[in-house]
Amino acid sequence: MAERRPDETAHAGPEHLDPAYVAGYDRKAAFDPAEDLAVLRSRGFGRGSTLVDFGAGTGTFAFAAALYCKRVIAVDVSPAMVAAIRAKAARPGTSNVGAVRAGFLGYAHDGEPVEAIYTRNALHHLPDAWKAIALRRMADLLVEGGTLRLRDLVFSFEPADAEAGIRRWIDATASDDPARGWTRAELETHVREEHSTFTWLLEPMLARAGFEIVTSAYAPIGAYADYTCEKTGPI
């Protein structure tokens, strides 16, 4: 199977492999992990828990989560992202975050099943068939009743409305400053070259993989969704 799966590094986008881009990534993303941490903690995530963070980027969520749990495994395909995580992990006072260079399809877990998985704005790098396989692999990593918190660029409008919906999303969210957000050109590249899907396709994938969707939320603009899922077993 390994020789037939896609090259996840090639799918990641060349900018994510560029150390100069990665150095400014935290400012560009401006991500606050508090809401997602609150969701996980409400579901029992705590001192005895292990979390795998897929598409961990520079580790913003991983290090925030590490304050509340036993162990965090931050997984990313980008050597530059992994180097950034390891640099942060080397700082005094951080001992429970490990970084692994891998993707959804190539990650090989070492240890017992985990209590939680987190992924944000990363699954869209895979085509739909491989998304489904990645979700099943994530389910296999979790203990029964474990939690998947999934956030991504997912379209909740209908296919007939796609042209207008995508234009509305780009118009509303494009930044004039590439250091502080994603530009129109970057968002248009996402639409052309990456693999955002529709909610009505992703949600059956979650069920097939062995997840029950506990909560779901769609952004009013129709281009983002988040899910809290519990591992229940594949259908």
Image (cartoon, rainbow, N blue to C red):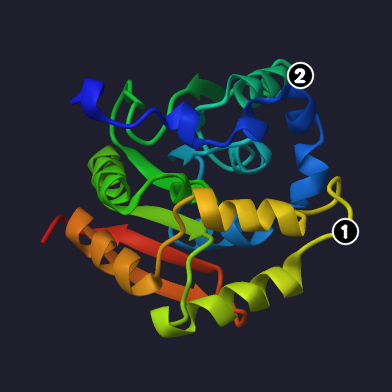
Mark on residue 154? none
Percent of width and height locating residue 128: 32, 53
**Toward the viewer: 93 or 109?**
109
Rendered location of residue 159, percent (x, y): 40, 78
Farthest left residue in view:
235
**Mark found first going from the N terminus, 2 or 1:** 2
Q: CA distance from mark 2 to mark 1?
A: 34 Å
> Decide: marks 2, 1 in contact (CB < 8 A)?
no
Q: Nearer the viewer, mark 2 or mark 1?
A: 1
Q: Position of residue 199 (x, y in %)?
A: 39, 71
Snapshot quadrant of residue 147: bottom left
Regarding mark 1 in the picture, which secondary structure is present there? loop
Q: Is residue 80 above or below residue 223?
A: above
Q: Quadrant of residue 143?
A: top left
Quarter the C terminus occupies: bottom left
- Give me the residue at 48% from left, 71% from top: 155
- Three-letter amino acid code of the residue under disc 2: Arg
Residue drawn 88% across and 58% down? Answer: 176
Question: Looking at the picture, which amino acid does disc 1 mark?
Answer: Asp
Residue in the picture at 82% in, 60% down: 175
Please name whichever residue, 25 or 168, is drawn nearer the observer in this view of the structure: 168
- Assign a secondary structure to mark 2: loop
Q: Is residue 120 above or below residue 60?
A: below
- Counting the numbered discs, the total is 2
Q: Is residue 14 left or right of residue 196?
A: right
Residue that label 2 marks: 91
Kindly identify which residue carries mark 1: 176
